[in-house]
Image: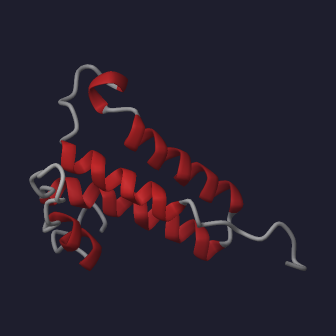
């Protein structure tokens, strides 16, 4: 979802209406939070489609930083991330773990 677009993509809509887990009920993501996760996902997929190893590595690092370095620790002046956003980013980390490009043209 681009910053100019107000219509959520299917992935963002899914994240925004995410049902609570059985162990720790958490509220769903706000549309802004869902758009943030969607942007990370879009970057990952764009790098994969372009077969750009460097861009894929950078996108993965950004997702890991967003998931495991909360805003209130990395950027003290901003509000902390919601538990639902952190959970969605961690789920995206698991999905992105399988995103790899072959090392050479023969693979």
Q: Residue at 60% of width from left, 70% of height from top?
A: 48
- Judged left or right of residue 33, residue 58 is right
In the rendered image, the quadrant that contains the C terminus is: bottom right
In the rendered image, the quadrant that contains the N terminus is: bottom left
Q: Nearer the viewer, residue 93 or 25?
A: 25
- What x and y, as percent, mark residue 92? 41, 59
Q: Nearer the viewer, residue 18 or 51?
A: 18
Quadrant in which residue 81 is drawn = top left
Vertical side of 17 occupied by 26: above or below: above
Quadrant in which residue 22 is drawn = bottom left
Q: Residue furthest toward the front?
A: 23
- What x and y, as percent, mark residue 59? 53, 53
Q: Residue at 39% of width from left, 42% of height from top?
A: 66
Colour option used: secondary structure
Q: Residue at 29% of width from left, 45% of height from top?
A: 86
Quadrant in which residue 100 is drawn = bottom right
Q: Residue furthest toward the top?
A: 76
- What x and y, as percent, mark residue 56? 61, 59
- What x and y, as percent, mark residue 83? 20, 43
- Judged left or right of residue 50, residue 90 is left
Q: Residue at 17% of width from left, 66% of height from top?
A: 18
Number of numbered markers: 0
Q: Residue furthest toward the right?
A: 106
């Amino acid at each position: 979802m681009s910053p100019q677009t107000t219509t959520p993509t299917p992935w963002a809509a899914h994240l925004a209406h995410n049902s609570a887990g059985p162990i720790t009920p958490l509220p769903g993501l706000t549309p802004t939070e869902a758009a943030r996760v969607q942007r990370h996902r879009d970057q990952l997929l764009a790098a994969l489609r372009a077969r750009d190893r460097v861009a894929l590595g950078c996108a993965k690092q950004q997702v890991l930083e967003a998931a495991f370095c909360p805003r209130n620790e990395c950027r003290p002046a901003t509000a902390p991330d919601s538990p639902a956003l952190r959970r969605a980013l961690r789920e995206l980390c698991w999905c992105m773990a399988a995103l790899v490009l072959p090392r050479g043209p023969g693979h």
